[in-house]
Structure formats: structure tokens, C-alpha cells
Amino acid sequence: MRLFVALALAFAAPAVAQEWRMAPEYDVLLSTYDIAPEEIRLKAGEPVRLRFVNNSNHELAFSAAGFFRDAKLRRRDGETVRNGTIEVPALSTRTVVLVPKAGRYKARGGSFVHRILGMNGKIIVE
């Protein structure tokens, strides 16, 4: 029985890796005043690659605690998302690959000031 489980896992691992590689990529643009697009629409249960782009001269954060908590993250991206937040250094990008779970989630900037200035959005997964 153990041999069967080990073989099943060995053959499943390449399929999962292939799934991550084939995930479509979406850009999420971050600025001090905005998240674009303001509404991110994804398909439940389908892998997606989210690339967070910060074109500003300041570090920015994208926070969506419920979304990241419910999603299945690619193992190596677990450290990119901390406490439901991704920090993106100035003039750089951060990419995470995940399988989202159906639901409606709030997204916002990491700092209170950025949220007041309009760095808010939503993620809709159907």
C-alpha cells in the first residue's frame, strides 16, 4: 500500500508542476494611489500567476488576507505572501502562483495612508 501511495505521489508531482507552468499571467499594477485593475476577476480552481508591479519609487504592499488564506499557493510562493500581504520593493515586481477559491475578497494597500488615498480593490473568484 505504501508503495502505491509513493508511486501515485511521484506521478502527480510532475502534473502539478506542469499545471503551475501553464498558469495564465495577470499583472496587478500598484501605485501610491491605486491598484489596477480595481477589480480582479479569476476562475475558481484554476491556477493563475499574479505579477505585482510597483513602478513607484517607494515600497508598496498589496494586502488581501482572506484571498491568500483561502487560495492554494505554490509551495515556493508561501514566503512571498506573509500574513496575507505581498511587499513589493520600489521599481520591481513580485510574482505568486496560486489556485484561487471561489468568493469575493477585499484588496488594499498595506498602509493606512495608501488606503485613504484610494489604494483599494476587490478580487472576485467565480
Image (spheres, rainbow, N blue to C red):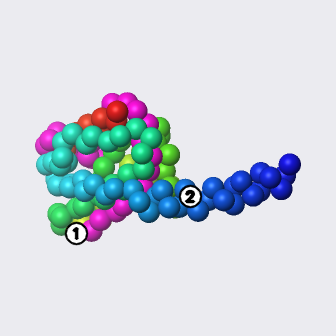
> In the displayed structure, would residue 94 be above or below residue 99?
below
Q: Which mark is residue 15?
A: 2
Q: Which residue is mark 1?
A: 91
Query: What amino acid type should be assigned to the residue bearing mark 1?
Result: Leu
Q: How many marks?
A: 2
First reached walking from the N terminus: tag 2 or tag 1? 2
| Residue 62 percent location from the top left of the image | 30, 49
Q: Is residue 117 left or right of residue 126?
A: left
**Where are the magenta residues, as a range?**
92-118
| Residue 95 percent location from the top left of the image | 36, 61
Q: Residue at x 55, y 56 (%)?
A: 16
Between residue 45 and residue 109, name the one nearer to us.
45
**Mark nearer the viewer, 2 or 1:** 2
Judged from this view, the residue extending furthest toward the top is 103
For label 1, count other residues whose C-alpha is less than 10 Å away and answer few (under 14), some (14-19) or many (20+): few
Judged from this view, the residue extending furthest toward the right is 1
Q: Is residue 45 left or right of residue 41?
A: right
Between residue 54 and residue 58, name the one nearer to us.
54
Q: Is residue 25 left or right of residue 30?
A: right
Look at the numbered disc 2 and give the secondary structure of its residue: helix
